[in-house]
Image (cartoon, rainbow, N blue to C red):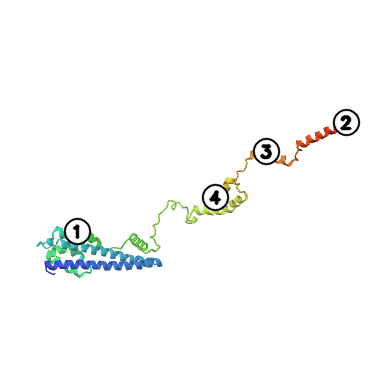
Amino acid sequence: MVPWNSAKAKVQLRLGVQRLRTLQEKKNAQAKASRRDIAMMLEKGKLETARIKVENIIHEDVYVELLELLEMYCELLIARFGLLDQSTREPDPGVSEGVCAVIYAAPRTELKELQILRDILMHKFGREFSIAVMDNKDGIVSERVTRKLAISTPSSALVDAYLGEIAKGYGVPWSPPKPPSPGPSSSAGGDGDDGPEGGVQEGAESGEKAGPSASAAAVEAPKPLDAAAISAEARSAGVRTPKLPELPAEKAEAPRVEKTAALLSPPAEPPAKAAHEDEFTLLARRFEALKKR
């Protein structure tokens, strides 16, 4: 183990912070390229390959979150270096969480600077404390760190959520499939011979059989339309038509027939002509009377 040296420990903490930031940027760039490849796979219909690559991206995202936590703990140890430099066999409670996180998580990273810093801290606080941290005795390590280091397969819901966000970000027309919800009519469909539609299929077939006869009856007996119905139908079709006159009621048909008969009958002689003929007859009679005298 590397012996404790205050100056070297502080320099190593700062180097660790720089390397952690650089590694995060590298991982983020790689994840961005992988997301672009996954979007192209979704566009080509290679769903299974895309799901496998998404699982890798999920693990990389968790690893980047672990790097962010370690960077935060290193910053904490730099800010509270006075508490870390005390001559005690156990770390101060103000820096204990950061020390335990570095000792426990440094072997799971690929940073040499954190490996050296871990050796320095283990030499300072002794073998017993280091073994207790590596075994996570009594939950001495923060749960945030242990959760990031847990190895597990991502759930299908999480993979679908990643795929949906990637497709949305790159404009790919894809959405995660919705889980099938059993309806109340699925269990009461009847026997298996009825098919997946059950009674609905029979009803559709009977409706198809009755369709031609019903349509023929509708053609044979058309529904009479009044003026208002014709105007409404024309307006619904987008045609502007003038308002049609209302047809007269049935009671008004009789007077209309009488008027028609009166028009067909020969017209009577005007009364003026009859009066003129009477006057002519009267003058003729007077003339005859004068001749007799």
| Image point (27%, 67%), residue name | 27
Q: Position of residue 203 (x, y in %)?
A: 52, 52
Q: Nearer the viewer, mark 2 or mark 4?
A: 2
Give residue 235's mark: 4
Q: CA distance from mark 4 to mark 3?
A: 34 Å
Q: Are dots 1 and 4 in contact, CB under 8 Å? A: no
Q: CA distance from mark 2 to mark 4?
A: 83 Å
Please state which amino acid type lies under the numbered disc 2.
Answer: Leu
Vertical order, 2 against 229 (above or below): below
Q: CA distance from mark 1 to mark 3?
A: 107 Å
Q: Local crowd at mark 4 within 10 Å, few (<14), some, or many (≥20)?
A: few
Q: Nearer the viewer, mark 2 or mark 1?
A: 2
Please state which amino acid type lies under the numbered disc 4.
Answer: Arg
Give the residue pinned by disc 3: 255
Relative to the observer, which residue lies in front, 28 or 285? 285
Mark 3: secondary structure:
helix
Please state which amino acid type lies under the numbered disc 1.
Answer: Gly
